[in-house]
Image (cartoon, rainbow, N blue to C red):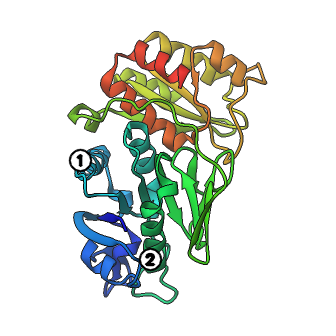
Amino acid sequence: MAHIVVLGTGGTISSRTGTDGAAVASDSAEVLVGAVEAGRGHTVEPVDLLRVNSFNLDLADLRTIADAVRDQLARKDVGGVVITHGTDTIEETAVLLDLVHDDDRPVVLTGAQIAPDQDGADGGRNLGQAITVAAAPESRGLGVLVSFAGEVFAARGVRKLHTLRPQPYVAQDAGPIGRLVQGELRYAARPVRPAPLPRPTARFDQTRVETLVLYPGARPDLLNELVRQGVPGVVLAGTGAGNLNRPYVEAVRAAVSAGTVVALSTRVPHGPIAPLYGCGGGADALRAGAVAVRGLPYTQARMLLALLLSHFPPAEAAARLQRF
């Protein structure tokens, strides 16, 4: 029997529909835990942390969650932590937590696609499954996980790919590492995790990293303006395997010369960055000084770069990003 702490942060799983027809995060962690089927064989402790829909979270909120996880895992009686979270930005919070996670005990994020006061509500089922995952001895050493609709994903590489389906998540270069089959947890793979990075500090809250998405006819004016403003990091979600265009490549070269760290990712849901093309393609972007981020969607690449820039000067952050 394990003692599991459930940290409530809001999201659809805690939302109620108002008179205007719009759902807003409302239910406490205690209410969420109380709605889960009894008889799990584990003790569960609800803790209210935040109560917001995840599209309103900022970097300070993510640090608050990271600090709360650290504080709970400082307790010897805690066997694992579950975080209820809005589905929109689970991928960002999950990867930040995983980047700094230095404990054998699992941290599991979950949520809901349908609010509890609507037909087909899925939050209670998802929370019950997440508690099972967090309590399982097999989950130890796997880092931070996302448990949703009977599937378990490693934090790194997970992303939301559908707005409304009961299972909205995929992994960038693989599938789920585990599944719950009739209540039994089965793992098929173990994630490879680099050494943990330093934990976020108050400086992380204000570390500005912006994301720009490439498209036909994209002009680098916004990149140039971010550099002019002194933004320390930019993530470019290129087309295909990380392609830009000729004007953008020149802007990348100027940005890097000015001290801005430019991370190169892709807007494509699956597949790696690859320096296949010149004439403004990915090969030229890397030669201009962009750093390819492999294995993470651009949303998670932003979290990694923000964490690095909050601890290290740009040149060192870029070097660490290159080795990640």
Relative side of 216 to 21, left or right: right
Q: Is residue 173 above or below residue 304?
A: below
Q: Residue at x 33, y 29 (%)?
A: 198
| Foreground residue among 166 and 187 | 187
Callout 2, which amino acid?
A: Gly
Q: Is residue 28 visible?
A: no
Relative side of 53 to 122, left or right: left
Q: Residue at x 41, y 14 (%)?
A: 316
Q: CA distance from mark 2 to mark 1?
A: 28 Å
The residue beneath circle 2 is 123
Q: Is residue 95 above or below residue 50?
A: above
Classify the position of the N terminus by image quarter. Answer: bottom left
Relative side of 142 to 171, left or right: left
Residue 313 spot, x, y in % from top left = 34, 16
Q: Are marks 2 and 1 in contact (CB under 8 Å)?
A: no
Q: Residue at x 48, y 78 (%)?
A: 125
Count of marks placed on residues: 2
Residue 53 spot, x, y in % from top left = 35, 65
Q: Is residue 98 visible?
A: yes
Among the 4 quarters of the image, the one containing residue 242: top right
Q: Earlier in the sequence, mark 2 or mark 1?
A: 1
